[in-house]
Amino acid sequence: MIRRIRGELVGVYAESVLIDVGGLAYEVYAPAPVREALSDRGLGSTVELFTYYYLQSDGNRATPYLIGFQTELQRQFFERLLEVPRMGPMAALRAFVLPVGRIARAIELQDTGVLRSLPGIGRQRARDMVATLQGKLGQFVDIAELPEVEAAGPRSDLEADALEVLTQLGLARSDALRSIVAVTTANPELQSADEIVREVFRKR
């Protein structure tokens, strides 16, 4: 299983990049934002990608594919997308055109309009994404993407109480606040600091 690749960037194409590792050139499929970022770095630069390996079967033939991401978080989010019914690796790859936090936020808030703007995502698949993943993406939601959220502090006394508990338990304030905002946005029915804290740890 190939989980990471590091080498010289020697090509950037419509859906993939080419990375030379010790004289062997590996074709790595990558989401559009990743390809754009690598292109900006320029050919000849040393790059490292976190990869997802899979075999695509077509009758009696199996074709290996590598899909690459700039961060471990991006790869983890991609793997969560594969939990959606009938969402194969290439479909998930092509839909991956927005930042992780933006897509995760749309799923958590049931914003099917944003989801349907992704390539290959129609009405039913957008609904499937929400039904499958809502409430499970707290770690991916970017606090800066959430509406009416101030990164400097909690939004309510309830969140403030939960923040105090989590920091006492050893979480960094920024991580605790990010987790609190994510779980309370996805689960507005939470009515106590204890419930919020339990949900935060359930998502970690």
Image (cartoon, rainbow, N blue to C red):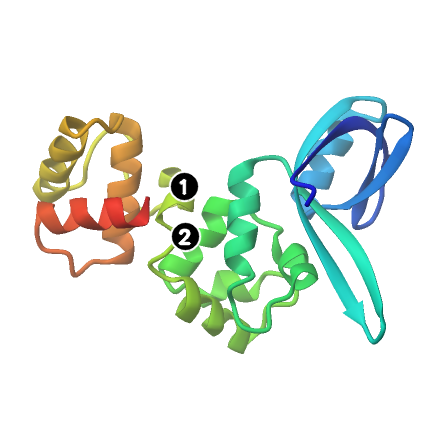
Numbered disc 1: secondary structure = loop
Q: Residue at x 80, y 46 (%)?
A: 16
Q: Which quadrant holds residue 48?
A: top right
Q: Is residue 135 visible?
A: yes
Q: Quadrant of residue 165?
A: top left
| Horizontal arrangement in the rendering, residue 68 relative to residue 107 (left or right) | right
The foreground one among 123 and 92 is 92
Residue at horizontal 81 percent and vertical 40 percent from the top: 17
Above or below for 188 versus 194: below
Label number found at residue 28: none
Q: Position of residue 163 (x, y in %)?
A: 16, 34
Which residue carries the number 1 mark? Answer: 142
Residue 21, compared with residue 17, is above or below; it is: above
Left or right of 177: which side holds 75? right
Q: Quadrant of the C terminus?
A: top left
For the question of whether residue 150 can be seen, the reply is no
Residue 44 on image: x %, y %: 85, 22
- Residue corresponding to mark 2: 105
Q: Is 145 drawn above or below residue 86 in the view shown?
A: above
SS under mark 2: helix
Residue at image location 76% in from the left, 22% down from the top:
46
The reply, left or right, for residue 47 in relation to residue 145 is right
Mark 2–mark 1 CB contact (< 8 Å) = yes
